[in-house]
Amino acid sequence: MLHALEIPEPVEPTVWVLSADRPGLVLGSTQDAAIVDTAAAARLGVEIARRRSGGAAVYVDPAAMTWVDIIVPHGDPRWSDDVGVAFEWVGELWLDALRRCGIADASVHRGPMVTTPWSPLVCFAGRGPGEVVQGDAKLVGISQRRTRGWARFQCAALLEWRVEPYLELLIDTHGRRDAEVAMGAVGASLGLDHHTLLGALLASLAAV
């Protein structure tokens, strides 16, 4: 339901702070639903959803993720017709928020998408323009849906990086040890609580 929220007209710069009321696995717009172990999802009480923006699967854990959508209308000073460049100011915004929280060794990924063997399956296993990383591990994932009139940036910051749900829901137990090692390195926990991070992000927004 949160992914299907309609953007009201006229479109104005908007920030939505979103929180799921139960765990969910969100597939990218073109991702094959056959990758999901539906029996495992039912057993674990995980809802399966799909977002309209691209990318791969994201496990939404209300206690382990800060989820913020940023909406920018066409014509806004932060708008860019270049889809890749459009992400950069959002990444810089998150980077400033993390620095306010004392995390000084993060950076914004610039340039083309970086893929790994797991990135077609799991969003956090790849790195796209504007996303915030700590070394090779992603801290903040960002996807984008855009029309002629607006761009919606969907941002997920990892308060805690948990590999186990992906292994349960998407990856066959064959080769689990190798998968766990590889997947464990693609994301990193911020070690912050939701309210601290959100307060820092809103302060960064106010300064833009």
Image (tube, rainbow, N blue to C red):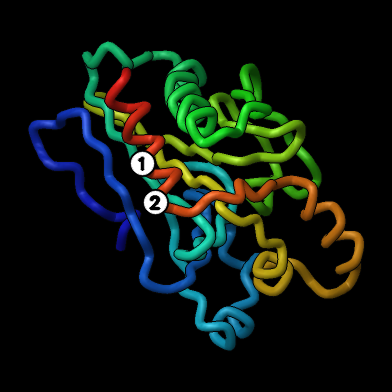
Q: Which residue is mark 1?
A: 199
- Would you call the spot at circle 2 few (<14 residues within 10 Å), some (14-19), or many (20 or more)? few
Q: Residue at x 72, y 30 (%)?
A: 114
- The correct choice, above or below, for 43 with respect to 88 in the image is below
- The correct choice, above or below, for 123 with respect to 112 in the image is below
Depth check: give the residue in front, 184 or 206: 206
- In the image, what residue type sits under mark 2? His
- Quadrant where the C terminus sits is top left
Q: Position of residue 35 (x, y in %)?
A: 65, 65
SS at circle 2 = helix
Q: Residue at x 53, y 60 (%)?
A: 64
Q: Which residue is mark 2?
A: 195
SS at circle 1 = helix
Residue 200 placement: quadrant: top left
Depth check: give the residue in front, 37 or 19: 19
Q: Are marks 2 and 1 in contact (CB under 8 Å)?
A: yes
